[in-house]
Image (cartoon, rainbow, N blue to C red):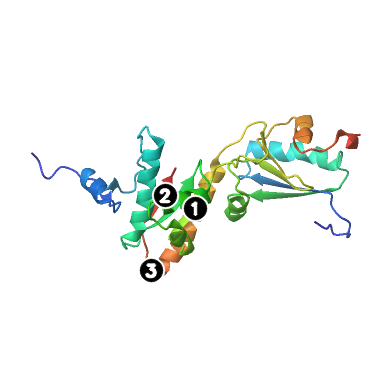
Amino acid sequence: MTKKDGTQAKYHLRLFIAGRSSATLLAIETLRKPCDHELQGQCELDAIDVIQQPELAERARVIATPTLIKQAPEPQRKVIGSSSNRDRLLLALDIPRTFSE
Amino acid sequence: MTTNAYKHEKLASGIRAFDYLSDGGLPKAIEPCSQVPQVAARRCIAYSFCAMASYNSRGMDGVLVTLEERPKDLIANVRNLGWDLELQIEERRLMPVHACADSHEYMIVSGDFDLSVLVSRVKHAVRRVQAKGCHQGGSAIFVVCI
């Protein structure tokens, strides 16, 4: 995944959501902070609404929303649910805590 | 015995014995739920329904939602019974929706979630089958969930 300025985005995350529910907003809010801090802008985040783009949900075989998929780097990780626990999210995604401020 | 009693419109499954026993098949536009305790028996009914509904050339198309088995395993199992679901899938008479988690997949559940995405996926599959069906002058759609 290449960013606009030509540098490689280290982390590629894909968030599957269903409409604008409170769970959706919580999932986005929980992700925003790690993307801005721990990953220091090395993070590309796509949000996909499964109601508008069900074919992408089909391809990724999403069975619940919200689902966060770490596409890159390998290994792929899938986190289901809208927990606001940031530490648990980082652990689940294999993001080292050394990035922490 | 009354003969003019209300009779719900039925959707013939194509399985002759089942259609006879159930007085014409499954009730149309209602979600019947098979509660046979044996999983294998439930699956056999669902497989037969999928296979027969298209085979008896009444133009019925379907969506098959698998909750426990991967579609490719299911296709292989059904082939042993003499039904070629793969062909039906190729001709877009049957759309599989793979709704189970693979055992090798690393998945973590944390917090609330809902399953509305499955409804979106099934609707999408129905639309895909219908899009093809339109060229044949429309067809009945069934959704089987196993």
Q: Nearer the viewer, residue B47 or A3?
A: B47
The answer to which quarter of the image holds residue A88 is top right
Same chain for the residues under marks 3 and 2 in the image:
yes
Residue B73 image point, x, y percent: 51, 48
Q: Measure the C-alpha gap from mark 1 to mark 2.
A: 10 Å
Q: Residue at x 87, y 47 (%)?
A: A41
Residue designated by label 1: B96
Q: Report the side of B40 relative to A31 (left or right).
A: left
Same chain for the residues under marks 1 and 2 in the image:
yes
Label 1 is placed on what type of residue? Pro
Residue B8 image point, x, y percent: 24, 46
Q: Vertically, is A93 above or below B76?
A: above
Can residue B76 be seen here? The reply is yes
Dot label at residue B136: 3
Q: Vertically, is A88 above or below A19?
A: above
Dot label at residue A17: none
Label 3 is placed on what type of residue? Gln
Secondary structure under tag 1 reads strand
Residue A50 image point, x, y percent: 60, 49
Q: Measure the C-alpha gap from mark 3 to mark 2.
A: 19 Å
Of the two numbered discs 1 and 3 in the rendering, the one whose residue sits closer to the viewer: 1
Q: Nearer the viewer, residue B27 or B62?
A: B62
Q: Chain of mark 2?
A: B
Dot label at residue B143: 2
